[in-house]
């Protein structure tokens, strides 16, 4: 019997990958003269469900800005590089990034449900680092031999783009390593494709014997709709701790009101603030930069308006430095 394609996979297949189509759908009559056809290795990709949260007729919608390729991406800006956080220098095994004490990160896939134009890994050579079965085994063996690693972070791309079978098989292998205490999943999928958080997936995750943490990624309160809330409730009922990391982005969330609203709303979804990142300087992303002084100034005002537990740490990552640098 033919197996039915899961709804979330169907939604990915039916997502937008063409600027003209999105603009027509959003009643944007004139496509910005700045928009471009993106490079083939980082195409436009966005689920319809996410586009449905954008304001019709508004080319400056903060969600649209995150996914619309524009000419500024083609500019060469001093200080912006293909590997801004030094991932490639920190790989003891294919797909394993070991930068920080006690934690190791696994690149599980090169794909995402959405392509965020500001992404720090937008130029990452994923094809060279695919985790084949053999390479996955080598990665797991590496983690098993490093007794001081207590936490494994599944990253990508987006690890929740793996189907349940592949994802759970990987998690079970990690779970079996005695010195691993926590498994962390970094994913934007609960926000951009909430249908991926199925009851079956949550049931399976609830049986994992190590602590599970999911760090989601939302940058603006308009991303948080009722379907996202339902997905978060399912994840919470599977005993998963939910944290959010955001990036401070020009034209998207660089006002006090936007930052306060985002973090207050996240709390109502049972997601606690974790990090607010300064933009990692990946080639093609300079038009999103909010400089450090402006970000500090904004966060000073956010701190005066929100209780401490709703204020994320403002951080930046620097290649070669073995921890995130906390700025405020
Ligand atoms: S979901 Fe995350 S990894 Fe994927 S493009 Fe967006 S920021 Fe990059």
Image (cartoon, helix red, strand yellow):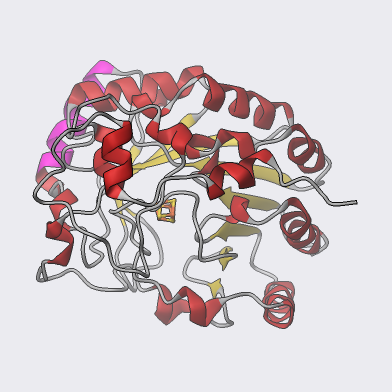
Q: Residue at x 25, y 53 (%)?
A: 279
- Residue 40: x and y in percent read 35, 69
- Residue 156: x and y in percent read 52, 61
Question: Quick check: 226 above or below 311?
Answer: above
Q: Residue at x 34, y 70 (%)?
A: 123
- Residue 197: x and y in percent read 65, 36
Q: Quadrant of residue 25?
A: top left
Number of disc labels: 0
Q: Residue at x 33, y 61 (%)?
A: 120
Magenta segment, prevailing SS (helix, strand or loop): helix
- Answer whether residue 237 is visible to the viewer in this image: yes
Q: Quadrant of residue 200?
A: top right
Asked if residue 204 lies left or right of residue 193, the reply is: right
Quick one: which residue is furthest to the right in this view? Answer: 1
Quadrant in which the C terminus is drawn: top left
User: Which portion, as a residue range, is magenta?
Assistant: 294-305
Q: Is residue 295 magenta?
A: yes
Q: Nearer the viewer, residue 66 or 35?
A: 35
- Residue 167: x and y in percent read 71, 56
Q: Nearer the viewer, residue 6 or 219?
A: 6
Q: Nearer the viewer, residue 143 or 172?
A: 172
Question: Quick check: 251 above or below 69?
Answer: above
Asked if residue 42 lies left or right of residue 258, the reply is: right
Q: Residue at x 74, y 62 (%)?
A: 170
Q: Is residue 208 magenta?
A: no
Q: Quadrant of residue 195?
A: top right
Question: Quick check: 110 above or below 9?
Answer: below
- Answer whether residue 277 is visible to the viewer in this image: no
């Amino acid at each position: 019997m033919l197996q039915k394609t899961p709804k979330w996979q169907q939604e990915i297949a039916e997502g937008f990958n063409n600027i003209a189509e999105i603009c027509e759908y959003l009643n944007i009559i004139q496509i910005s003269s700045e928009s471009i056809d993106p490079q083939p290795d980082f195409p436009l990709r966005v689920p319809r469900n996410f586009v449905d949260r954008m304001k019709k007729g508004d080319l400056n919608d903060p969600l649209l800005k995150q996914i619309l390729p524009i000419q500024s991406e083609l500019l060469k800006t001093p200080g912006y590089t293909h590997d801004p956080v030094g991932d490639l220098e920190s790989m003891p095994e294919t797909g394993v990034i070991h930068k920080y004490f006690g934690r190791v990160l696994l690149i599980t896939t090169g794909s995402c449900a959405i392509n965020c134009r500001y992404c720090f890994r937008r130029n990452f050579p994923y094809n060279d680092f695919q985790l084949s079965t053999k390479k996955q085994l080598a990665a797991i063996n590496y983690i098993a031999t490093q007794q001081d690693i207590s936490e494994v972070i599944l990253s990508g791309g987006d690890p929740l783009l793996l189907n349940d079978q592949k994802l759970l098989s990987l998690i079970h292998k990690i779970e079996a390593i005695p010195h691993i205490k926590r498994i962390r999943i970094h994913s934007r999928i609960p926000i951009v494709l909430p249908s991926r958080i199925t009851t079956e997936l949550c049931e399976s995750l609830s049986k994992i014997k190590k602590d599970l943490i999911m760090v989601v990624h939302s940058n603006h309160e308009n991303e948080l709709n009722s379907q996202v809330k339902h997905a978060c409730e399912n994840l919470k009922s599977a005993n998963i701790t939910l944290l959010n990391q955001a990036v401070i982005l020009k034209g998207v969330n660089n006002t006090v009101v936007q930052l306060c609203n985002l973090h207050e709303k996240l709390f109502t979804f049972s997601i606690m603030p974790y990090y607010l990142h300064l933009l990692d300087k990946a080639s093609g992303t300079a038009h999103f930069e909010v400089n450090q002084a402006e970000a500090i100034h904004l966060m000073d005002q956010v701190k005066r308006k929100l209780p401490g537990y709703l204020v994320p740490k403002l951080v930046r990552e620097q290649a070669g430095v073995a921890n995130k640098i906390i700025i405020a």
